[in-house]
Amino acid sequence: MKVKVLLFANLRERIGTSAELVDIPDSASTVAGLRMHLMRRGGAWQEALADMKVVRVAVNQDMAGANAPLNAGDEVAFFPPVTGG
Amino acid sequence: MKIAVQAEDFDLSTEVIEISMNTRTGAVASFVGVVRDVAMTLEHYPGMTENAIKKIVEEARTRWQILDLAVIHRYGELQPGDQIVLVAIASSHRGDAFAACQFIMDYLKTQAPFWKKEHHPDGPRWVNALEADDEAAARWRGLKQPQRLLKS
């Protein structure tokens, strides 16, 4: 199934893309599964998503934990802790 | 009620007048965040940012009497001295207006998806999240441990 992966701020810069449609196996249909799937690409993906202390995840624009389930067409965003205000 | 995420600047007086129309209004508290000495680029997550601010505002409305309010947060290129964020609260009494204003600012800093990239003379640098901001937000929840968004 396909999900839309979005990247923001330093993750977007390190990985070099802001959005990508990613095909993941049904067995990887959680946030943690998607993260592992992306990290297996190696390189910047592996490095940028390695330390989840500095990565937050939102599914369909709501904050989500590692165990959050994913469905086809979901929008999954990875970004660093926020620094607005 | 006004919630806006915009590149354009805002005018404090105009916003305060707009939210002070209700005749029960007895207090208006406002906060304006300003860029210090380093230019910056503010990135956000269109859609989610607006929704996150709406949720923070809804939470504030359950805690305090708010007759009207304005929350404006800018994004894009900002120079030293530029205004970044406005929170203005109209209430019948100052206690509610002050508290709601501070609550919304504390939550904005930890819950709304914005990221600051500062442009220093030696190159650009993403601003790191501050634990002090987490603690400021956690205060309102009575949490012992600071918590930035949801742990994964």
Image (cartoon, rainbow, N blue to C red):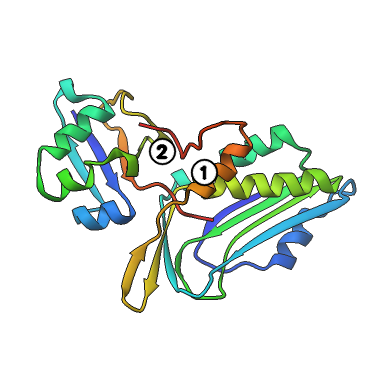
Quarter that holds the N terminus of chain A: top left
Q: Is residue B50 visible?
A: no
Q: Residue furthest bottom?
A: B121
Amino acid of disc 2: Gln
**Total numbered circles:** 2
Q: Residue at x 73, y 45 (%)?
A: B99
Q: Which mark is residue A61?
A: 2
Relative image position of residue B142 (x, y in whole percent) = 62, 31
Amino acid of disc 1: Asp
Q: Residue furthest front?
A: B144
Side of B82 relative to B64 (left or right) = left
Chain on which label 2 sits:
A
Q: What residue would you read off at disc 1? A: B134
Chain on which label 1 sits:
B
Query: From what the image shows, is residue B144 above or below residue B81?
Result: above
Relative image position of residue A60 (x, y in whole percent) = 37, 35
Quarter that holds the C terminus of chain A: bottom right
Q: Nearer the viewer, residue B59 or B137?
A: B137
Side of B49 relative to B29 (left or right) = left
Q: Residue at x 63, y 41 (%)?
A: B57
Q: Nearer the viewer, mark 2 or mark 1?
A: 1
